[in-house]
Image: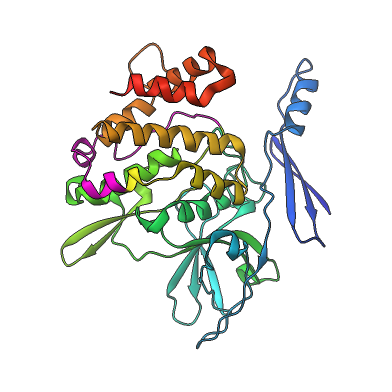
Amino acid sequence: MMHSELNGYCFFITLEVEGSNVPFNISFYFELHWNPHQDQGFIEGGLKEKRFSLTYPLGVHEQKNDEREYVEEVESDGEMFGEDIELNVPKNYEAELCEDGLGGTYFVKDRKSGEKLFVFKPVDEEPGSVNNPKKNFKQIKDGVLPGEGAMREMIAYHLDRDQFAGVPKTKYAELENFDNNSEKKKGSLQLYINNDGNSCDFGSSLFSVDNVQRIAQFDIRTLNLDRNGENLLVRENDGEYELVPIDHSYILPTVFSNPWFEWMNWKQVKQITTSEVKKYIEGIDVEKDSLLLKKLGMKEESITIMKLSTLVLKRGTSVGWTLHQIATFLCSPISQTDKRSEFEKLVHQAKQTNSNDFWSTFTELLSKRIL
């Protein structure tokens, strides 16, 4: 089935393919502001990989028995991830659009009690997507196409092995009867975290060194392009304040895109890496993570980004660099004329030195650069 839509200066063509074990849709996006000299290049650019939503394999999730009736959900093959994630949506639920953010983010609530249970982000309502309820039709981050965020949300949970950084339980799901109609929606479904606000509402000094460093290492590993104060939730328990990282739609980009982290200049990351965090980083298996990402459908470019940033994380930690130093190595300088980060310069040097044996060359240069 083909659907097209004109939104201001944006023209969308969406192809939906059904009747297959691998349901998917593909959206082509065009911005209608070319001049006569740009026609051909503009069209060719749109038909390549300018904007399209994710193709993702789905399987059926079994209905669970308890006091509530649950809708049937479609999720990724549990065997692929090593476990079946149980996030059971009541049949009698309602979806409330969250005012914050640039895309369609919904609180999934129990209609009877009003309790917030989950956060759901539909694939076709992400920033840059045709059904975005907030009319944000432009791609907002280089290296992450509209429609790819839901997969990244799910991947963040699985890549956070042993939930060391505290990424909430998340899966890729399809909800029936979305928004009180017969429409089905595919997207990321995440456990709702009861909280007392976000890190912008609190002073950063309230949080423990271990808590902040666990999140920092995860953001570095995944080259998170959107770690801001609003997506670090705060929970208070007996006077202790804990950060919970959410919103991972912009991890693992396909291109290096000037990351910046909310915690960059917090005192916790300027301290020596804790023994617990250091041990975890030492135990990260880059090849195992690469295999996981391949199984989850990530592009090779994103896997390469993950491998490079993780190698920097592991090398820096091994020689006693703080997470602040490692993050500074990755992030582009603000005041200098050359806006490339030290990381970008190193990757470029490795390519120029020996493109046929890039990885060994990069590793060698990395060892000489981070001492």
Q: Position of residue 133 (x, y in %)?
A: 59, 52
Answer above or below: position of 39 versus 22. above
Q: Where, by quadrant of the figure, is residue 117 drawn?
A: bottom left
Residue 172 appears left or right of 267 = right
Image: magenta residue range: 255-279
The quarter of the picture where residue 18 lies is bottom right
Of residues 46 and 253, the one drawn nearer to the viewer in this rendering? 253
Applied colour scheme: rainbow
Horizontal arrangement in the rendering, residue 353 relative to residue 265 (left or right): right
> What percent of the width, then of the height, locates residue 226?
43, 41
Q: Quadrant of the C terminus?
A: top left
> Residue 244, how many percent across, how many down?
33, 56
Residue placed most toward the observer, 267 or 274 = 274
Residue at x 53%, y 23% (from the top left corner) = 358
x and y, in percent, of residue 368 in the image: 34, 19
Q: Main secondary structure of the magenta part?
A: loop
Left or right position of 67 against 13: left
Q: Is residue 285 above or below residue 36?
A: below
Disc tally is 0
Q: Residue at x 39, y 42 (%)?
A: 219
The N terminus - image quarter: bottom right
Q: Residue at x 34, y 26 (%)?
A: 329
**Residue 200 in view (yes/no):** no
Q: Is residue 324 visible?
A: yes
Query: On the rendered structure, is 329 left or right of 155?
Result: left
